[in-house]
Image (cartoon, grey):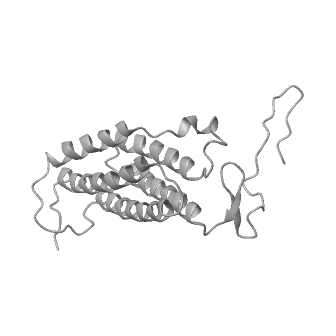
Amino acid sequence: MPYRPTAGTPTLALVKIYTRSGDDGQTSLFGGRRVYKNNLRVAAYGDVDELNSALGAAVAVEPKELQAELLTSIQRDLFSIGGRLASPDPEKVSGALKRVVLEDERIAAIEAAIDGAESELPELRQFVLPGGTLKSALLHQARSVCRRAERSVVALSQTEAVPPVILAYLNRLSDLLFVLARLANRDANLQDRTW
């Protein structure tokens, strides 16, 4: 039997997850402009979204406490990056974009995290094969998705304006994910396998 609210029960307006507006292969950018789903801008923020999901998988597996606060803050940054990339006319939606600001300080925080992790790891002299613990493998996977997202954003930046902080952020982030993957193996008393 379907739920029927009683008199006086507040109801919430439900938003349908499907709109059918993309059935023709187009989507709306933030600000209303319609483009095809293979547009460079859509590819860029789609790859950033995939990166966010890959990070979510890495955060979800044990040991969950490994850099959880840092990785969750990065997921928030990725939402900001995606929102900015989805906005070809930032002046048109400037009020809504106040929440999607990415400050240069975030790059400094990532660099500090890289330096901290590297100080705990043995010097690297060979290429590392992705794998080891599940946590490490998922961080390596997120790293490779990050590199793809970076390539997509670079492609977009060659035809449209992209804030330089986004490119620098993604470049540093892949480095951080690499050292965190190594740290996950080290914490599990596993040596990195080398090529």
**Where does residue 77 sit, x and y in percent of width and height?**
45, 43
Closer to the camera, 11 or 178?
A: 178
**Where does residue 83 sit, x and y in percent of width and height?**
56, 47
Q: Is residue 108 left or right of residue 81?
A: left
Q: Is residue 171 visible?
A: yes
Q: Farthest residue in the top direction?
A: 8
Q: Is residue 184 above or below residue 195?
A: above
Closer to the camera, 93 or 13?
A: 93
Q: Is residue 8 above or below residue 34?
A: above
Q: Farthest residue in the bottom direction?
A: 195
Q: Is residue 78 left or right of residue 181?
A: right
Res 20 quadrant in image: bottom right
**Where does residue 63 sit, x and y in percent of width and height?**
31, 48
Q: Is residue 67 visible?
A: no
Q: Is residue 127 left or right of residue 1?
A: left
**Residue visible at 9% across and 56% down?**
123
Q: Is residue 95 left or right of residue 194?
A: right
**Residue visible at 28% across and 55% down?**
175
Quarter of the picture holding the C terminus: bottom left
**Where does residue 168 sit, x and y in percent of width and height?**
36, 51
**Residue visible at 35% across and 45% down?**
64
